[in-house]
Image (cartoon, rainbow, N blue to C red):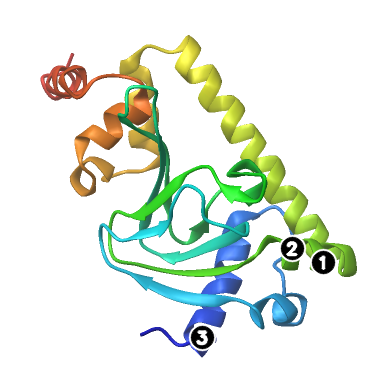
């Protein structure tokens, strides 16, 4: 069972995650993040283990210290649709974009063994109000997520599947060796059969 408080290694990993998420800002210090670290809850996940289910609450922010997570939903036909792949060090998208009426709208699971920390979204809001450095960091994380979503919407509408796959490979090298291809296909907006054909074409130099 995981301890309920962060280890020294976790604390260093949290600082690293914060720096990786917003490299354009001066790194947050231990003093900046101490109030948040005090309420963070660490969790170790096995591959395939669910972190958040649809309907879970209250809203949680999640830093990914190591490993790879996937967020997804079910479509109208009951099929899984992968919204995003989330590698560590990093974070899940801010909870404001993953929740409605205080409940999770997405399922989040580990695709590889992973170590994460969770904390209530309200705790982050309180620290953003109290500490300008944390506010700048939180605003930058949210802005980056808005840009990522806009880029994804544009890519799904404007780019052919081949270009979407190449962009995913550039962003997450080695993903196809780690993840079930049905998850990649749904993320790209194509069928698994189409993904298989596309991979074969690219392998052949097409």
> In this view of the protein, can residue 166 be seen by the observer?
no
Across and down, in percent, residue 90 comes to 51, 58
Across and down, in percent, residue 164 comes to 38, 22
The residue singled out by tag 2 in the image is 122
Above-or-below relation of 133 to 146: below
Distance between the alpha carbons at the discs numbered 1 and 2: 6 Å
Across and down, in percent, residue 181 comes to 21, 35
Above-or-below relation of 73 to 135: above
In this rendering, position of residue 46 left or right of residue 89: left
Residue under the point 33% across and 35% down:
169
Distance between the alpha carbons at the discs numbered 1 and 3: 21 Å
In this rendering, position of residue 103 left or right of residue 201: right
Distance between the alpha carbons at the discs numbered 2 and 3: 19 Å
Quadrant of the rendered structure where residue 47 is?
bottom left
> In this view of the protein, can residue 153 be seen by the observer?
yes
Which label's residue is closer to the chain start, 1 or 3?
3
Q: Between 53 and 125, which is closer to the camera in this rendering?
A: 53
Which quadrant does the N terminus fall into?
bottom left
The residue singled out by tag 3 in the image is 4
Q: Between 174 and 116, which is closer to the camera in this rendering?
A: 116
The secondary structure type at the circle numbered 2 is helix
Marks 1,2: beta carbons within 8 A:
yes
The residue singled out by tag 1 in the image is 126
């Amino acid at each position: 069972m995981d301890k309920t408080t962060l280890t020294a290694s976790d604390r260093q990993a949290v600082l690293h995650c914060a720096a990786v998420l917003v490299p354009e800002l001066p790194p947050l210090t231990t003093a900046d993040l101490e109030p948040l670290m005090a309420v963070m809850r660490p969790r170790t996940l096995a591959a395939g283990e669910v972190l958040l289910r649809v309907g879970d609450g209250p809203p949680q922010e999640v830093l990914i210290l190591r490993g790879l997570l996937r967020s997804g939903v079910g479509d109208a036909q009951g099929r899984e649709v992968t919204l995003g792949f989330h590698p560590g060090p990093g974070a899940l998208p801010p909870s404001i974009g993953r929740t409605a009426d205080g409940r999770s709208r997405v399922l989040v699971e580990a695709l590889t063994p992973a170590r994460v920390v969770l904390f209530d979204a309200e705790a982050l809001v309180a620290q953003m109000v109290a500490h300008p450095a944390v506010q700048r960091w939180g605003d930058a994380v949210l802005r980056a997520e808005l840009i990522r979503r806009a880029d994804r919407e544009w890519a799904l509408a404007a780019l052919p599947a081949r270009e979407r796959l190449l962009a995913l490979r550039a962003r997450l090298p080695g993903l196809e060796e780690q993840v079930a291809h049905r998850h990649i296909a749904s993320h790209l907006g194509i069928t698994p059969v189409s993904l298989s054909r596309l991979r074969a074409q690219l392998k052949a130099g097409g």
